[in-house]
Amino acid sequence: MRYISTRGNAPVRDFSSVLLAGLAEDGGLYLPESWPELSVAQWRDLRGLPYPELAARIIAPFAEGSITHDVLLKLCRDAYSRFDHPAIVPLTQVEDGLFVQELFHGPTLAFKDMAMQLLGRLFDHVLNERDEKVTIVGATSGDTGSAAIEACRGRERLNVVILHPEGRTSEVQRRQMTTVLEPNVTNLAVQGTFDDCQDLVKAMFADGPFRTDMHLSAVNSINWARIAAQVPYYVYAALALGAPDREVSFAVPTGNFGNVLAAWVARRMGLPIRALCVGSNRNDILSRFLNENDMSIHGVVPSLSPSMDIQVSSNFERLLFELLDRNAAECARIMTEFRKTGVMKVATPVWDRANALFHGISLDDAATEAEIRTLNTRSHYLADPHTAIGIAAGRAFREPGIPMVAMATAHPAKFPDAMAQATGIRPALPASLADLYDRPERYSVVPADLNVIEDRVRTAVLSNSKAG
Ligand SMILES: Cc1ncc(COP(=O)(O)O)c(C=O)c1O
Ligand SMILES: N[C@@H](CCOP(=O)(O)O)C(=O)O
């Protein structure tokens, strides 16, 4: 499979090269040149497969020409062997027609493990083949960071530098990152928001000489491989609920738009998905866009669901490119204008196309707490604040006869204060993380300044090469 940039001005690459490149050189995001499509019979054939086998079958067309199905299968089996639920992504019914798919049974208790455990292994495989090393720079609002660190810690060919917004993650989230002391891991607490962290990562990629010298790569969902590895769980849920012979809808708590974009990809491959419903917190840029055609940046407000405290949703660019019938020049123009003015309003036919499939709502903290309480008392389901927002979105747009699946994106134990505030319950961390509060931390606080951060990345790479 060959990959093209949403801005039309970067080299066409294969899957392995896109994995290593992360962001395209023109600032755009990579997408497959064409979409693989499965027939009804092919979807039916996938029913009942164990999750790792299903994942390998779904991802294989995207990796065609780079990684064989057999290698993918081996990597998937290995990646999902660390999950603590036999189904990997279990489905639970919480209300009439409303299901929850739990994506938090991996080592860091959030849906990011679903892709990241595979990505760590994919990086190793490709870098071994090429005899190369890379420096991964990533931005996190709380979950991507720990999942990336866990997947890459101790891997010889990888340096990992993660930027998180100082004081804006939960304590559990911060400790999951900062207590990993392997020499190839560096944590920087940036004095700013997640959007600042994400902009700094993109700025490092835009600095050509730095990008080349450091062999930069990405683990955020700007990296296509992250999206590809998030598609299989939508397939798993839909098949379990009657697809391809029945339509299914999904509700996704949304920030950077990567998770719900993977659902869009599954639909593009032919999975009968009726509606995609996004839930935001008060950082409601996506729901405002869907309801009012108003994508204007308002500044990030801290919330009970810190991982979604995001205004600039990177993956929206991929959807926009598709809504524009892959007009890369127009996509580049709109994105450049958006970053210059902080405002985006698309032409009505483009907005209508988005609205035909996507719906959005936003919940403030009080509504999120109320949703957590309702789920706990009525359905005996303990949902973390992100998941609760997704479930509320699912309920809001549920239609008779169409199963609605809400994505449970994090374990409630990652947000003990918010859970205690809403329900009086402080969910315990699993045994593997029971001593998290006793582990020593290592991180540096840095200003949101590109020169300072690039310096820290250089130093980290140098000191790790000395340590090795
Ligand atoms: C727990 C949790 N829920 C939801 C989201 C939003 O997902 P996305 O950024 O893919 O839209 C995130 C972060 O990305 C998260 O960590
Ligand atoms: N919520 C994320 C933000 C980054 O999202 P990504 O999917 O693009 O990595 C986080 O937890 O860091």
Image: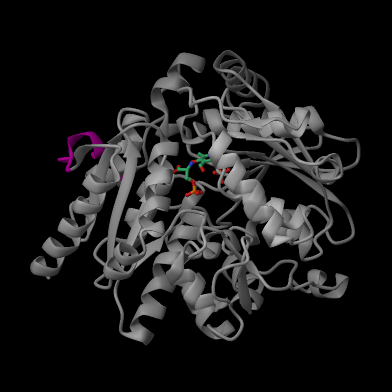
State the image quarter where residue 270 is shown.
bottom right
| Relative image position of residue 305 (x, y in whole percent) | 50, 28
Q: Using the image as rendered, state which of residue 393 and residue 136 is in the foreground.
A: 136
Q: Is residue 342 above or below residue 316?
A: above
| Quadrant hosting residue 62 | bottom right
Q: Is residue 439 magenta?
A: yes
Q: Nearer the viewer, residue 174 or 93?
A: 174
Q: Is residue 260 left or right of residue 435?
A: right
> Quarter of the image containing the N terminus?
bottom right
Residue 146's place in the image compared with 392, above or below, is below
The range drawn in magenta is 433-442
Q: Quadrant of the C terminus?
A: bottom left
* Residue drawn at x 67%, y 69% as measured from the top left: 49
Horizontal arrangement in the rendering, residue 423 relative to residue 211 (left or right) = right
Question: Quadrant of the rendered structure where residue 286 is?
Answer: top right
Q: Give the residue drawn at x 57%, y 34%.
A: 341
434 displayed left or right of 346: left
Q: Residue at x 34, y 61 (%)?
A: 136
Instruction: Tell me where residue 23 appears, x and y as whole percent.
Output: 48, 61
**Which residue reaches farthest left?**
466
Q: Is residue 390 visible?
A: no
Report x, y in % for residue 382. Answer: 55, 29
Main SS of the magenta part reads loop
Task: Give the x, y percent position of residue 192.
Answer: 35, 31
Where 163 sits versus 161, above or below? Answer: above
Residue 336 in magenta stretch = no
Q: Is residue 49 visible?
A: yes
- Depth check: give the residue in front, 270 or 242: 270
Q: How is the image coloured?
A: one colour
